[in-house]
Image (cartoon, rainbow, N blue to C red):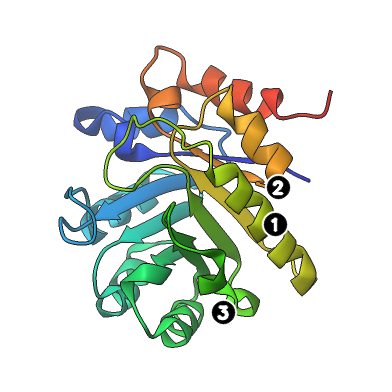
Amino acid sequence: MTIKIAPSILSADFANLAKSIESVQGADLLHVDVMDGHFVPNITVGQPVVRSLRKTTDIPLDVHLMIDNPSLYIHDFAEAGSSVITVHAEASCHLHRIIQTIRDAGCSPGIALCPSTPTVMIKHVIHMVDLVLIMTVNPGFGGQVFIPETVTKIREVREIIDRTGRDIDLEVDGGINDITAPLAVKAGANVLVAGSYIFENDAPKKKVERLRNVCLPA
């Protein structure tokens, strides 16, 4: 299983965002947390920032919509340059339609689950997505501590994915560092989102590689 590292710009230096992005060259994805202050208690970035990032880097943009009414914004984020667009199962009762809209817009669709949301929520759409994102903290803020109970959920979702026979990424986001990353990978995750662990130090690129290396088989 190939491990992919997705630095989260939530912890990047927004006064020097281009420099922050340059510092993580070699990453597989660039994770962009979009928050609206309704679905989660914080407000971050929107389509203009995604558009600027697309002009700055060739790293695929992994856009995570933590917003209400995500269907209203799919085309805008796709046109801005998103590579992956992930919506929350909790944010809409029309997941089939939203996932198909993401696909039709030319992006890879993903579906996300908050820590307390049961895995049954993805049962009827798993065949439609390219990525499942398990939140390993309650979404809304960076720098939180990994919730240990989510390891069981990662394992459950890996089993669901394997039963489809499809190549679907299993991404984890929240409290990921060189201690928790191997736990998530052992449970079945292959995409690791990390923000503060990578950016809140003087050597982000080394942290990307450190995270990748600690998850390699012994």
Identify the secondary structure beneath mark 3.
loop
Which class describes the residues within 10 Å of circle 2: few (<14), some (14-19), or many (20+)?
A: many
User: Is the C-beta separation of discs 2 and 1 under 8 Å?
Assistant: yes
Tell which of 20 and 159 is nearer to you: 159
Give the distance between the C-alpha atoms of the residues marked 1 and 3, in whole angstroms.
Answer: 15 Å
Residue ID for mark 2 = 188
Apparent side of residue 39 relative to residue 81 in the rendered image (left or right): left
Looking at the image, is mark 2 or mark 1 earlier in the sequence? 1
Q: Which quadrant of the figure has residue 143?
A: top left
Image position, residue 114 (x, y; %):
41, 56
Q: Is residue 41 left or right of residue 58?
A: left
Amino acid found under the numbered disc labelled 1: Arg
> Identity of the amino acid at label 3?
Val
Mark 1 and mark 3 lie on one chain; the one further toward the N terminus is 3
Q: Describe the element under mark 1 as helix, strand or loop.
A: helix
Question: What's under tag 2, amino acid-wise?
Answer: Gly
Reading the image, the residue beneath label 3 is 125
Q: Residue at x 53, y 42 (%)?
A: 149
**Along the line of sight, the residue nearer the viewer: 21 or 138:** 138
First-in-chain label (2 vs 3) = 3
Q: Which residue is disc 1 drawn over?
A: 158
- Up-down relation of residue 130 to residue 75 (above or below): above
